[in-house]
Each structure stands twice: as C-alpha cells, then as structure tokens.
Image (cartoon, rainbow, N blue to C red):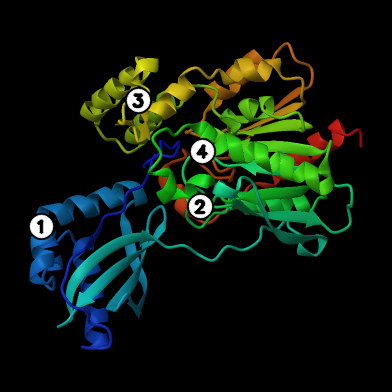
Amino acid sequence: MRHAAHIVAIAWLAVLVGCGKSAGTGDAKLRKARAQELVANLARADYGSARTNFNMIMRFGLTEAALKKTWEGLQEQTGKFVKTTWTRETVHSGYNVVFVGCAFEKTTMKTKVVFAPGDRVTGLFFQPWTREWKAPYYVDESKFEEREVTFGDPEWQVEGTLTVPTDSPDAPVIMLVHGSGPHDRDQTIGPNKPFKDLAWGLASKGVAVLRYEKRTKAYQAKLAQSVVFTTKEETVDDAVLAVQFLSSKGYSNRVFLAGHSLGGHLAPRIADATDQLSGVIVLAGNARPLEELIVEQMEYVAKIRGKDISEQMEGMRLEVHRIKGLGANDRIRREVILGAPISYWLDLKDYRPIERAAKLKLPMLFLQGSRDYQVTGKDFELWQQGMKHRENVSFQMLENLNHLLISGEGKSEPIEYQNSGHVDQSVITAIVSWIEADRGN
C-alpha cells in the first residue's frame, strides 16, 4: 500500500537486470575504470558510449533514449553535474559493485554500477549520498540519557526512544508525531534526522522527548493487507497510546504533543482523543486538505524547474475532483487515489482541523518556516484566523527555515532534503520558552 505524502517524492531510477553472480572475479581496476568512464560519458551527454560496457540484458532493458531521459531528469533535481569525487568497490548481494561519488550543483550523489561476470555492467543506480549523522552544535550530550521503550497495542506494538534530562526529575515531556509516509523514530529524510535533532536539542535544555517508529514503517507489509486504512490507523491510535504510556511513567500533567506536517494537521484530533495532554505544538502543520497541497507542491516544483507539466496537472486535478466527490458508499471500493485508499480520503474529508483546534482549551504553539513550500504561509494564516478568539495560542514564523525546519537560502526544493543539515536552534528556543512560560517558570 502506498500512502499520500506531503513531500513530492524524488524518484531515482534503479535498473538491475543480469544473470549470475560475479563477486571476487574479474579485474577490480578495470571495473573502476569502466564505472568512471560511464559517468564521464553521461556528463558529456554521450549516451551511446555510456552503454558500451552494458551486458546484453542491460542494453535491452535500458535504451539510449531511456538513459538520456534518466540523466537529464536527475539533473533537473540535482543541478548540473560538476565532477566525480571518489571511487570505491565493494561486494553486495554477491555482485561486484563500484560506487562513484558525484558532485552536482545542488547536492552530492553516488552512482552505483553493478557488474556481472566478465565485468560487464548489469545494474545502474543513482542514489543520495547519505553522510553519517552528527549531533547539532547546540546539543550537550552530558545533560541527557536515552532509554529504549515499548508500548501500545500488542498487535501493533510500538518501539521508541525516550530521551531524558539527567538533572531534571520533573521535566516536561514532548511526544513527537510524524508527518505522512513510513517514517522511523528519527523521521529520517536523506541524511537528516529532524526528530533526533529535536530530541537531543530539547533534552539539552531540560525537556524530555519521546520519539517512536511509525506504524506504517514498522508494519508496512501487514498494513498493506488492511481493507480499511485511515489516519486513525496510521497516526492517531499510536499517538494516543504514547500519551497514555508517558502518563503511566509519571509524566502526568506535563505531557505535550508536537506534530510535524501531517502530525500537526492531526494534532487537534489526537488532543480530542485524550485528556492527558498539557499542550499542543504544531510544527509546519497544514490547515488545508492534503490533496490540495499535493497539487500546489507539484505546481511549485515544476515552476522552479521551468517545466511545463500542464498535462500531468490536468490529470492531478481530475484525481482531486474524484476525492472531493467521494461519499460513504465509496468506502468499500478497494481503489487507490493519489497513493492512498478511498477510506483514507473519506476519513480526511470530514476532518476540520481549524474547527477542532478552535474548540480546544489547551495551550497551543504554531511554528512555521518561511521557506516551506510544502506547508506554506497560507496554512499559517488560516490557523491564525481560526484561533484569533483564543488567548492561550502563540504563533511564530521562523525565517529561512524549510519544511524540515532546517535553515537555508533561496527557494526551497526537494533536492535540498538530500543535503545534511539540522533543525535550527530557533525551533528549540521557541519550544522551550513557550513551555517554560506555560508552566510559569
């Protein structure tokens, strides 16, 4: 089952066709030279020569025209190719594999070239080059410890990490709720781990944090068999169980929910389902329907790349029209629209996040990045308008931050999520200050 996501996906072509395993045979120097030559030919737009060392099945599976389309499509996202930076060989799944580091204008990638017996190319991959995560400068690892925890329904048991300040026995605790998609506890996107940044940054300032594996990550295959799938199964149920778990561990009356993106969109629904929260934080959460954001994101990305996608957009708008027209009688249809089943869209269709939030009595904090193209200032303004009658609600627009709350310059675009960065310290400061003010510190 594929689920709708706020992030416009970056699709990297992967072709792997071949026969027989080749590990440990042939000439390693030759393989490295051929991998480097392949990349050099792509850089020269000499796609015929790039296919010189393809084996027969690979040549049949990846034509010159297809290779050209792939390379050009890649550079639409990464910027123009600049140079190769390194080459190394390894063995993976019984194949000799050569990786070539590639610098582009906007990011770094690695080209993975898989070799069959006879040192012929049988696989070609373009992959993000993920660097090892390192703690942000604002983290003090001496001020907290981490504990592995398990909670929830036995059928859908949740594994997570509780980050606890070592010198604050009565510390407040924040539970982090993911955006859409099958995320791990760190909400890893490329080399970035925004939830780990938040957990370590907040714990360094005396705030405990619970982050956990999302159900769609831990039970992806099992959920694929579900007849009905909604945000309740995806997000809400486990979030409510997380609140109950924290309350059972002595955090009663000091549990805060922080939802990012879809998690922020659903925060009012989660808060409605429990009486054990002390406050709600919405991090780049959309106020508008998800399907409308998907269309807006596609239009934005196409515009900054100078592409005409009018035909694709027409198809997309027809899909949105179908979603808007869904009714209760459609619930039993096993059909997917924009990557999600009909039951998912019907569940969201009747959800009014602003109305739900307006009725809450809990303190709320809304944080939004000014460079966010996925959830924009339009959503931020809608939240503000809907909350204007409430006194215990705060709003902050944080300059230069993208959807992952990472600072940058210029127009934000999908490829920047493949560049290493950290949640900006201003986010940590805003959350800590708000909690301290709410608790009367």
Q: Tell me whether circle 3 and circle 4 mark residues in contact (CB < 8 Å).
A: no
Q: CA distance from mark 3 to mark 2?
A: 26 Å
Numbered circle sitting on residue 234: 4
Marks 1/2: CA–CA distance: 37 Å
- Return the residue nearer the eye: 69 or 281: 281
Residue 63: assigned label? 1
Task: Please name the residue that numbered disc 2 is placed on.
Answer: 218
Sequence-earlier tag: 1 or 2: 1
SS at mark 2? helix
> What is the CA distance from the residue labelled 1 to the residue labelled 4?
40 Å
Judge left or right: residue 215 versus residue 56.
right
Between circles 3 and 1, the one closer to the viewer is 3
Which quadrant would residue 40 be assigned to in this image? Answer: bottom left
Q: Which residue is outermost to the top? A: 389
Q: Is residue 111 above or below residue 217?
A: below
Which residue shows up at 23% across the image and 81% down it?
Answer: 31
Location of mark 3 (residue) = 332
